[in-house]
Amino acid sequence: MQVNAILFDVQSIQKYIFANNKLKANVGASYIVDRLFEDVLCKDVILNLESGADITSWKTRRDSITSLPASVYVAYIGGGKALILIDNDRVNIIEDIIKTFTAQVLTQYPGLKVGVTTGLVTLEKDQFKSDERQLFKQLKDNQYTLNPILHPANTGLTTICDYSGDTADAVVNFGDGERFVATSFIAKYNAFEAANARLKKDLFGTEDIEWVFPSKLNELGQNKSTEKSKTGINDIAIVHIDGNNMGARFISCNGLEERSALSEKVATKTLESFKSLIQWIIDKYDILTKPKNLELTDKMLPIRPIIVGGDDITFVCNARIAVQAAHFLMQELLSDNHGMSISSCAGIAVIPTYYPFFRGYQMAEQLCDSAKSKMRAYNKDNGVNESCWLDFAFLHGETAPTLEQFFANEYSSLRGNMHYGPYQVYNVHASITKKDIFALTKLLECTHQFNLTKEKTYKGELLAHNKIKELRSVLQDNQHIQDLFIEQLKKNEKILPDIVGWEGFAKQLWDEVKIGDTRELKTPYVDAIELMDYILPGLE
């Protein structure tokens, strides 16, 4: 049976969410995007135009359909897209749905870009895939040819919003005096309370909880006693995690019901994995609040989720738990809990608290892309379909516009690139062997051993703490200086951390490793040294 279809798509989602520098607005914008189709399209528009429409059964339907269960049927919502199927007898409603929905988005949520296309799809499995693919192609073509104006024009005579950079067209008092702001910003900011209530219900099942999620970036447990962000005390981290090859998973679905089921399973898996992360933080709260660790007000969590939808997760947290939290969450996603396993890649941008937030997010996204590039190369070289990778960077002061330029400026030395990542994340039960030289657990163990030398009571063989700090500058120098450093360690009967598979680094600081089709000199010690202030003992 052939029916009419409308395919909606929210475009430039990240730009909409992160195009301002106030955490409440970031969270509110994410909530708007997350609830747009279910609340606005389905409840406000479709049910008003067609009271008998079926907007919910797709979530639980597992049987094949050869005819629509209602004249207007929501086939699935997920990944920023919504597919609406309409019976041939109600073809006249298609234009009304599109007009009403897009007009409401434009007036209620200015700045949010929605794409749409229409066509015909066949409900039978064999043909549905082909028809759906054609709809996606039309949607992409429309994206390149249609550029709607979503904001009032900036003529040069207009005032700019203090928070978003858009044209200011309203005056609002946020408690610190009146400000000229854009209505697009106001819509995001005003959605924060609803977003907060929904977050508590999703993660705890009720709004009545003792735990508090931060509403400002300076509430993540930073130590206020110093302004030296290089210590790792005043920094925050933006963590972006993205599932691997999820597009291919959805394309391989046979029929509408299989796609709907996968969409629901992915959303459930992501949410349950994030719940586990929050519980992990709560279980470790006594460690987090130890002296010299995080300075948290009572029951304040050092993390704020911004996007938890589909296979896409973005959160901001205290920088000192970022790598360990991302590691835990990626392992949860990779586990077989909750009916499926999702392999993923992550990017972590560590930034000062008042660093431009959108710039930090862009770098986190680029780091995630870097991890995905490493994933693809590794999968090809090793004949595997799935692997998980994580990359991170520390941003302070002026930063190059691209990740490649940043690493070239900050991590180049006379002998090679001092950034060893991206690092591979394994299932919690996996056996990590000597050849797994990029395993994140090896970096964490190296950092742990470096941190042991901070204790005045330490009497082991590892090089002294002051020598660890010296090692970073030594690695930037020539081979002669590095050879002298190694000789001095031998003379003093001191060693570098004993990490299985890193014996070559322990002997000569650098070693050749395979990168794609070439071999390059690399060293993991700069990453380990920089992580020393960003790892909390006891979170393992």
Image (spheres, rainbow, N blue to C red):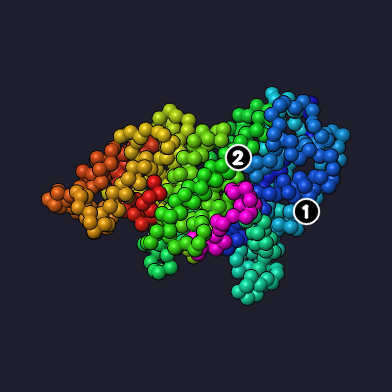
Is 126 left, or right, of 270 in this rendering?
Answer: right
Name the one closer to the observer, 328 or 278. 278
Disc tally is 2
> In front: mark 1 or mark 2?
2
Label for residue 268? 2
User: Which span of residues is magenta-colored?
Assistant: 198-220
Q: CA distance from mark 1 to mark 2?
A: 31 Å
Neighbourhood count class around disc 2 (C-alpha, 10 Å): few under 14, some 14–19, many 20 upward: some
Name the one closer to the observer, 168 or 224. 224
Name the one closer to the observer, 299 or 50. 299
On the image, the x and y values in percent for residue 471 come to: 25, 54
Is 436 left, or right, of 210 in this rendering?
Answer: left
Reading the image, the residue beneath label 1 is 103
Residue 526 lies within the magenta run: no
Q: Amino acid at mark 2?
A: Thr
Q: Residue at x 59, y 38 (%)?
A: 266
Split into 4 quadrants, where in the image is the N terminus? top right
On the image, the x and y values in percent for residue 426 come to: 42, 37
Is 255 left, or right, of 52 in this rendering?
Answer: left
- Vertical placement of residue 256 versus 309, above or below: above
Q: Amino acid at mark 1?
A: Ala
